[in-house]
Amino acid sequence: MSQQVTLPLVPDTDGVLQVPADEVSRLLRRLGKQWLTKVRTGGSDLDGETVATLTIELAKLADRIDVACIAHHSNGDGSKR
């Protein structure tokens, strides 16, 4: 059974639609967790070791997004120090 995911889209000043970074990192973590659950419960014939490795990489990417956002907000103006 799949779950529907809705991501909020926010237009920037040029009208380009953006997705909030916290939503993206949450989606990456949820995707990995769902893959692992399917493998562990026998709901998928995917290789468990491969899924575990992919899940770790998704979590690392989500962590990098979170760290970049924290750094951006910590600087106040978004500039690098």
Image (cartoon, rainbow, N blue to C red):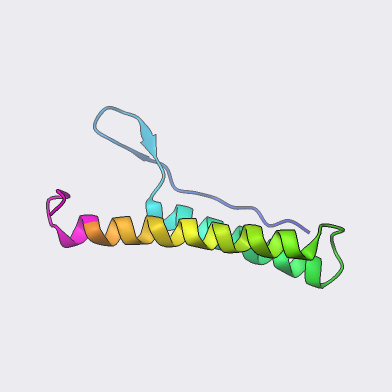
The image quarter containing residue 81 is bottom left
Magenta-colored segment: predominant secondary structure = loop
Whether residue 79 is in magenta: the answer is yes
Q: Is residue 13 magenta?
A: no
Question: Which residue: 14% across, 58% down?
Answer: 75
Whether residue 10 sits left or right of residue 35 in the image: it is left
The range drawn in magenta is: 72-81
| Residue drawn at 74 percent across, 64 percent down | 49
Determine the image quadrant of residue 74: bottom left
Q: Quadrant of residue 50?
A: bottom right
Quarter of the image with the N terminus in it: bottom right
Q: Residue at x 33, y 61 (%)?
A: 67
Seen from the viewer's position, the closer of residues 14 and 38 is: 38
35 sits to left or right of 5: right
Q: Is residue 48 left or right of residue 65?
A: right
- Name the residue: 17% across, 50% down: 78
